Every structure is written in C-alpha cells, then in structure tokens.
Amino acid sequence: MRKIGSNTRKFFSLIYSHFLKIMHSKNIRWNLFDSIESLRHIVCDVIMNHAAIAIAEKGAFSIVLAGGSTPRAIYRLLRDMPTDWSKWHIYINDDRCLPVGHEDRNSLMVEQVWLSH
C-alpha cells in the first residue's frame, strides 16, 4: 500500500475544508452514521414518521419503492413495524421492462422481502 505524504494530506484536508464550506453555504446537510445498520434503522424511522403524519393528516401514506440490494434491508425492517398497513399505498418503481415474475424485477424482491410477510 502506498503511503500518503504530508503535502498530499494537507492538500486533501484543504479541499475537504473548502468542500464543507460550500456545502454549508448552500444549506446542504450531511449526516454521519456509526454503521450501515444505524443508517438503516434511522431511514426506517424517518419513513414511519412520515407515514404517521400523512395518515393522521390525509388518511393515507403513499410511497414509491426502489429495487436493488440497497433498500432490501430497510424493507425487512419495515415489514415488522406496527402500523395500519391498509392506509399505505405502495408503488414499485422499476426502470426496466421485465416480464412479471422475472427474477430481476424490483416487484419480486419487494414481494419476497416485505409484502408477503
């Protein structure tokens, strides 16, 4: 493994500092998490909070789900949450046109991981 010299570290530190100033000036917020598991639980909590607010104010909550491996663990967490699922309107996004039941369809993953439980 190649070692990074002090000048390179200073350069990247300066770039990073400048980057943070730009992000702050544009009101862009970054959140740091202790672990991927912590991130998953917080995302799940955020979704559940938005659902509770929408159901209280409008009587229903709508969500569009993505596919792939990234949200899979979040869907597993959501399936065990206490909520009135009859108030949830769940839509599945897929940018590919695949036949029903195809192993790569987002809807199949969502069904297997969450909706069939």
Image (tube, grey):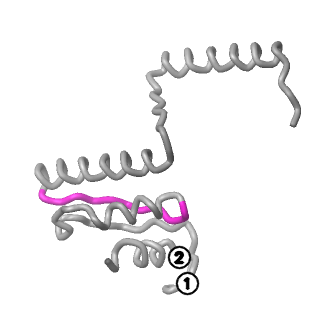
Is residue 5 found left or right of 15 in the rendered image?
right
Quarter of the image for residue 84 reads bottom left
Q: What residue is rendered at 31% in x and 67% in y?
A: 79
User: Does residue 6 sit above or below 110 in this rendering?
Assistant: above
Is residue 29 found left or right of 42 in the rendered image?
right
Give me the disc on residue 23.
none
Q: Magenta region: which residues? A: 59-69
Residue 41 location in percent, x, y?
37, 50
Query: Label 2 near label 1: C-beta < 8 Å?
Result: yes
User: Does residue 65 sit above or below 37 in this rendering?
Assistant: below
Residue that label 1 marks: 102
Kind of residue at badge 2: Arg
Quarter of the image for residue 19 reads top right
Residue that label 2 marks: 105
Kind of residue at badge 1: His
The quadrant the C terminus occupies is bottom left
**The magenta stretch spans residue 64:** yes
Q: Secondary structure at mark 2?
A: loop
